[in-house]
Amino acid sequence: MDYDKILQTILDIGEEMIVAGGEVSRVEESVFRMCKAYGCDRINVYILLSNMQVTVETPEEKIITHIRFMERNNVNFDRLDYLNDLSRYICAHVPDVEIMKLKLDEVMSRKEQPIWLDMLGNILAASGFIVFFGGNGFDAAAGVFMAVLVFALQRFFMPRENNQLVLNFVISFVAGMFALILVHMGFNVHGDKIMMGGIMLLIPGIAMTNAVRDMLIGDLASGLLRLSNALIVAASIACGFAMSIALIGGVL
């Protein structure tokens, strides 16, 4: 067996798990089990926010180390579910590396859910949180347009800007301007409630959840890094909305 290619493909699967939103501990266990299934020994898997390192000893007593730098972020729980299924399939059947790659390509090429469904989720979330935080029907209606605006900005900027701080700052600034302009135009809405709907669409909840889970199981390094990154992103969102308030004059 070509263990270099096998380990490289296993890292490909692990990387896509992290990118799709998997927590570090589960991905480390999945990578460990896949390596074990191919007869590797002395397996060491170490994953941080953007770095994955795996060292194994093959049955021929050869030490192999692969390091992978991960800079993408595309949360997709549907894809993560299929990647988990793929890891279980590999552990159960131990396929050849070509079959592994074929199965991975099948998962990665699956048709994503339609855009309208993503937009509908944004609309329901924004309007729902606006009502939850005390907004009226007009605020909820404005939340529909806020959700569409945030969704459109994300679709436009994500392929063009990898820096999450800049991306979230720009989107939150534009969303804040939109909410305050509605107030200035005399609509019977509350700017702070509409902003809340936009904030809840941008807040990195999954990153914070995974950070807490990592720390609870003892993976402090990864958990603290994830939490720090999530808090910095949250701060960029707050700065974007604060900048819009400062420019418009603070009218809510």
Image (cartoon, grey):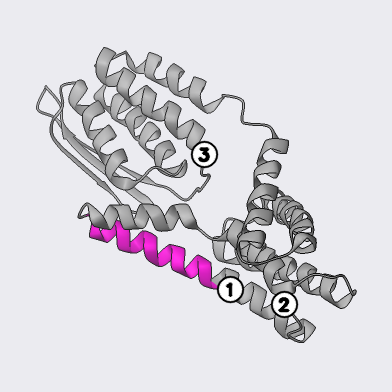
32 or 136, which lies in front?
Answer: 136
Q: Which mark is residue 138?
A: none
Residue segment shown in magenta: 219-235
Q: Which mark is residue 76?
A: 3
Q: Give the left or right position of residue 39, taking residue 225 as reference.
A: left
Quadrant of the image containing the C terminus? bottom right
Quarter-wise, where is residue 7 in the image?
top left
45 or 221, which lies in front?
Answer: 221
N-terminal of the pair, mark 3 or mark 2, is: 3
Residue type for callout 1? Ala
Q: Predominant secondary structure in magenta?
A: helix
N-terminal of the pair, mark 2 or mark 1, is: 1
The residue at 59%/69% (across/down) is 237
The residue at 72%/77% (across/down) is 244
Residue type for callout 2? Ser
133 is higher (above) or lower (below) than 6 = below
Q: Which residue is mark 1?
A: 238
Q: Secondary structure at mark 1?
A: helix
46 is higher (above) or lower (below) than 29 = below
Quarter-wise, where is residue 44 in the image?
top left
Residue 214 part of the magenta segment: no
Q: Which residue is mark 2?
A: 244
The residue at 32%/13% (across/down) is 96
Residue 226 part of the magenta segment: yes
Circle 2 residues within 10 Å: few <14, some 14–19, many ≥20: many
Residue type for callout 3? Asn
84 is higher (above) or lower (below) than 52 = above
The residue at 79%/82% (across/down) is 248
